[in-house]
Amino acid sequence: MTAWLEQQADVRERRGLVRKPMVRGPQGAAGKEGGQRKESGQPRMIDLASNDYLGLSTDPRLAEAATEAIRRWGTGAASSRLVTGTTELHLELEHHLALFTGAEAALVFSSGYLANLGVTTALGGPGTLIVADEHCHASLIDGFRLSRSEVREFKHNDTADAARLLEKRTQPRVLMVVESIYSVGGDAAPLQELFNLAQEHDAALLIDEAHSLGVAGVGAFQGRGAVAGTGLANHPGVVRTATLSKALGSQGGAVLGSSLLREHLVNRSRSFIFDTALAPPAAAAAMAAVGIIQQEPWRAAAVHHNAAALAAQLQPRPGRSAAVERSAGAVQSIPMPSAEAALAASHAAYAAGVQVGCFRPPSVPDGVSRLRLTARANLTPTDLDHACSVLRDILERTS
């Protein structure tokens, strides 16, 4: 085993695929400096990498809610939800999440990853065909594998290709799986077309709203997710998953759907049954975030305003192909010519005080390495101007 581990380390080094956790300093309260604190002797880092889309992870109201939950319930849940891990707080959070998103019911997991794992394994199996977009998140893919279902991938956002796969089904059940806003490219799925297709083929539609909740939504439902406010929100054939650790600034995940689905997951989802429940302070912080999003719609609007500003300022000059395409949510994506170029660009940006995401194989397929920028609500015009100036210079040198 040791020899194999050494060999694997050598392969990663030669391929330029070595990954190391990026260590950051503490954050201050959200405000004029985009939620970042100047540390002694260190320049302030402009955060275009995190998933704290609404700037709520450092909001004192979430901290206060978490602190009160610790006083009342303790720092941890102490057991699984089916033993003593379910508190009144968990049930209250589920109630508020269902109301917020327009679902009949919600079930909270200890992470978004486990929510995806739990719902796909509980709905999958030898009698279920899974038809999934090729850009689905790793947590969904792992769930497909563990479910022992037959899995067929369709070309990204290609409903005709999805229809072709559905027409070949022989299984009694079908689960079509997509993301409402994709995590790397930031593009949106054609949800109404996919829903119509699912209805035509008697398939359930699973929509991962990890990068949509808190940001996307129709009209007055902005911030409640791409599905909220549409005819899909409370349809029994539609299942949604979400994370509480991105726009909601906390930790955890949830499955949103019918009461019948919730009851099935409580009894069949292994990542719910055998996992310690979400910690009470995280549940309380997430519930506080739901209230803030409803009371302060300017946060979701600011995300879209800043996303548009990033896209406008990073349009290519003649001779350079890499550009930001205005996306449906917070994630903005810049294609890069190679994994090495993406990594070098992210390091150069960091050295200049701008932190961006770097996506390269195996996180993305070969040939689609990119920088990922997140347009957070509490970025100031000065932040955006400086970050775009740094990135334009780096992209010009890359081309």
Image (spheres, rainbow, N blue to C red):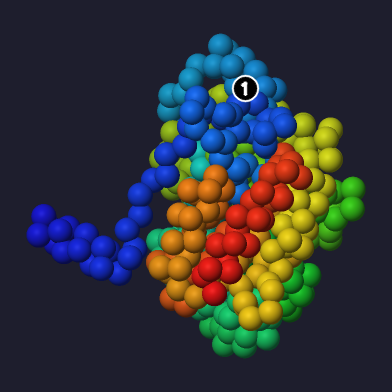
Which one is nearer the viewer's eye here, 375 or 62?
375
Q: Residue at x 51, y 38 (%)?
A: 110
Q: Secondary structure at mark 1?
A: helix
Q: Dividing the image into 4 quarters, which one contains the N terminus?
A: bottom left
Which one is nearer the viewer's eye here, 5 or 136?
5
Q: Is residue 192 above or below residue 50?
A: below
Measured as percent of width and height from the top left, residue 348 is found at 48, 55
Residue lying at the far right in this picture: please name it: 220
Side (left or right) of 293 relative to 319: right
Q: Is residue 199 above or below residue 384?
A: below
Which one is nearer the viewer's eye here, 305 or 184?
305
Side (left or right) of 96 relative to 37: right
Residue 191 visible in the picture: yes
Report the residue marked by disc 1: 63
Q: Residue 325's quadrant in the figure? A: bottom right
What is the three-letter code of the residue carrying label 1? Ala
Measured as percent of width and height from the top left, residue 204 is found at 65, 66
Measured as percent of width and height from the top left, residue 158 is found at 66, 81
Residue 285 visible in the picture: no
Q: Residue at x 55, y 62 (%)?
A: 394
Q: Residue at x 15, y 58 (%)?
A: 6
Q: Residue at x 45, y 54 (%)?
A: 347
Measured as percent of width and height from the top left, residue 285 is found at 63, 28
Side (left or right) of 352 relative to 211: left
